[in-house]
Amino acid sequence: MIGPAYPRQMARYNAWQNRQIHAALEGASLDDLRADHGAFFGSILGTLSHILWGDRIWMSRFAPDLVGAPEGGIEGSPELCPTLAVWSAERFVTDAAIARWADKLHALDLTGDLTWHSGALGREVSKPKALCVVHMFNHQTHHRGQLHAMMTRAGFDAPVSDLFAMPEDEAAVRA
């Protein structure tokens, strides 16, 4: 389904997106970040928190030595980060862990099934590891689309999200 190059590329893309989002929202009031936009997780900050929560729950399954499972379930995920500063710090740590995990992947690591207890479904689930990895990155993209709409609606400059527009130069990516 996928090889190790896919998670590496997507880890870079995820971190790039998060840096752009932080830059676009830096200086925003907490009221603006918590305003309900009618999205699934309500607000900009709630959606950012949920994406982070999702990344952590998946990474706790893929690499529990790098990332521990977040507290609570999906319902409480919008409350994970009370401020943009907290989100930014937690996001930085999680993005670094995702990158370290992706950089060490081998093709064999993406084979076989992953089995876990799904709180959302209330039962044990087993799915191909590669599918779960694709899902983690797809989940980020799905909710960042909602985030883009909320940011635009609130008058923020939503960042460029096209994968082909991502800078290739590592120094530019970290800027």
Image (spheres, rainbow, N blue to C red):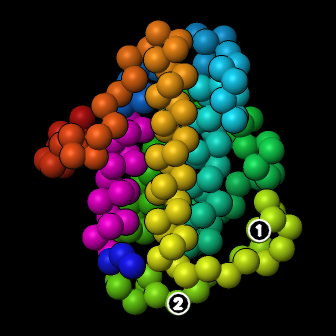
Residue tagged by mark 1? 118
- Specify whether residue 16 is painted magenta: yes
Q: Amino acid at mark 2?
A: Gly
Closer to us: 21 or 150: 150
Closer to us: 1 or 69: 1
Disc 1 from disc 2: Cα separation: 18 Å
Position of 106 compared to 32: left or right?
left
The secondary structure that dominates the magenta segment is helix
Considering only vertical position in the picture, is 20 above or below 118?
above
Considering only vertical position in the picture, is 92 above or below 153?
below
Considering only vertical position in the picture, is 58 above or below 24?
below
- Percent across and percent down for residue 34 are 67, 19
Q: Which residues, given as a range, are shown in magenta?
A: 4-19
> What residue is rendered at 34% in x and 37% in y?
161
Residue 81, visible in the rendered structure: no
Quadrant in the picture for the C terminus: top left
Q: Earlier in the sequence, mark 1 or mark 2?
A: 2
- Which mark is on residue 112? 2
